[in-house]
């Protein structure tokens, strides 16, 4: 906002946002201003969520498969990690699932693990934070509490949050970063740039026999 307006200070912007937040709360509006992913967003108030769903049945969101949900939960709570680590936890092959999560912009490649073979490592995106209403990963609740999220939080992401419960993860492992390098050359993978979120999604190259 400061860069757009150009003539105001950070303190003035913060004060204006606080005033807007207060006005929206006091005037009985259907929207509210919330902080997500390091920024601000106008969202529908929780109590009006069910009414919007009734009005928008024709645009029902396509849900992720159970396998995609489980992989997303593993990545969110244990990132960064490589595909083989996800497959070890789930017990099944996950290349197709990872492609889907990258296409939905919920997951991105964050670098390569500093081990022989330098496998690609995956993590969640800014879009993931925005749709769960989180400022950063430190706000992720213990996995067992996901099923207790309110209807509005669950509605932010078109998935069945209850399906995430049951995936065993460490509550703090997401903050224990593994050795990662980020010198990913464009000739090693196809790069897709999202100008809005400034996220780079890379398609893991097929291993040659």
Image (spheres, rainbow, N blue to C red):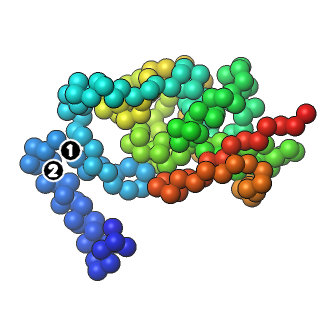
Residue 152 location in percent, x, y?
A: 31, 32
Crowd rating for badge 2 (residues with CA inside 10 Å; few <14, some 14–19, many 20+): some
Residue carrying label 2: 24
Q: Position of residue 34 (x, y in %)?
A: 30, 49
Residue 50 visible in the picture: no
Which residue occupies 42% across, 45% down?
130
The C terminus appears in which quarter of the rendering?
A: top right
Seen at 29% across and 24% down, the residue is 57
Which labelled disc corresponds to residue 31? Answer: 1
Pick out the residue farthest to the front: 58
Residue pictured at 41% horizontal, 33% vertical: 157
Q: Looking at this view, is 24 or 203 the one in front?
A: 203
Earlier in the chain: of badge 1 and badge 2, it is: 2
Q: At which x and y percent is residue 31?
A: 20, 44
Residue at x-position 72% and y-position 24%: 93
Question: From this viewpoint, which residue is outermost toward the left?
Answer: 27
Does 150 sit left or right of 50 as displayed?
A: right
- Is residue 169 positioned above or below 138 on the image? above
Which quarter of the picture shows residue 92?
top right
In depth, the one of 39 and 184 nearer the eye is 184
Q: Nearer the viewer, residue 162 or 43?
A: 43
Q: Farthest residue to the bottom: give it.
A: 7
**SS under mark 2:** helix
Labels 1 and 2 touching (C-beta < 8 A): yes
- Is residue 82 visible in this depiction of the protein? yes
Look at the image and tell me in which quarter the N terminus lies. Answer: bottom left
Q: CA distance from mark 1 to mark 2?
A: 7 Å
Q: Position of residue 26 (x, y in %)?
A: 10, 49
Q: Secondary structure at mark 1?
A: strand
* Residue farthest right in this picture: 209
């Amino acid at each position: 906002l400061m860069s757009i307006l150009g003539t105001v200070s950070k303190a003035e912007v913060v004060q204006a946002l606080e005033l807007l937040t207060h006005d929206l709360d006091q005037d009985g509006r259907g929207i509210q201003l919330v902080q997500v992913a390091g920024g601000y967003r106008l969202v529908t108030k929780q109590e009006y969520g069910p009414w919007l769903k009734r009005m928008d049945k024709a645009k029902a969101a396509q849900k992720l498969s159970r396998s995609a949900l489980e992989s997303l939960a593993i990545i969110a709570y244990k990132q960064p990690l490589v595909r083989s680590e996800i497959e070890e936890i789930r017990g099944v092959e996950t290349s197709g699932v990872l492609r889907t999560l990258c296409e939905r912009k919920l997951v991105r490649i964050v670098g390569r693990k500093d081990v022989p073979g330098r496998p690609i490592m995956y993590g969640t995106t800014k879009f993931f934070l925005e749709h769960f209403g989180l400022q950063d990963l430190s706000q992720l609740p213990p996995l067992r509490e996901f099923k207790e999220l309110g209807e509005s939080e669950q509605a932010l992401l078109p998935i069945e949050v209850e399906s995430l419960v049951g995936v065993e993860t460490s509550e703090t492992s997401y903050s224990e970063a593994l050795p990662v390098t980020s010198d990913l050359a464009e000739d090693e993978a196809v790069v897709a740039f999202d100008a809005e979120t400034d996220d780079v999604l890379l398609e893991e190259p097929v291993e040659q026999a």
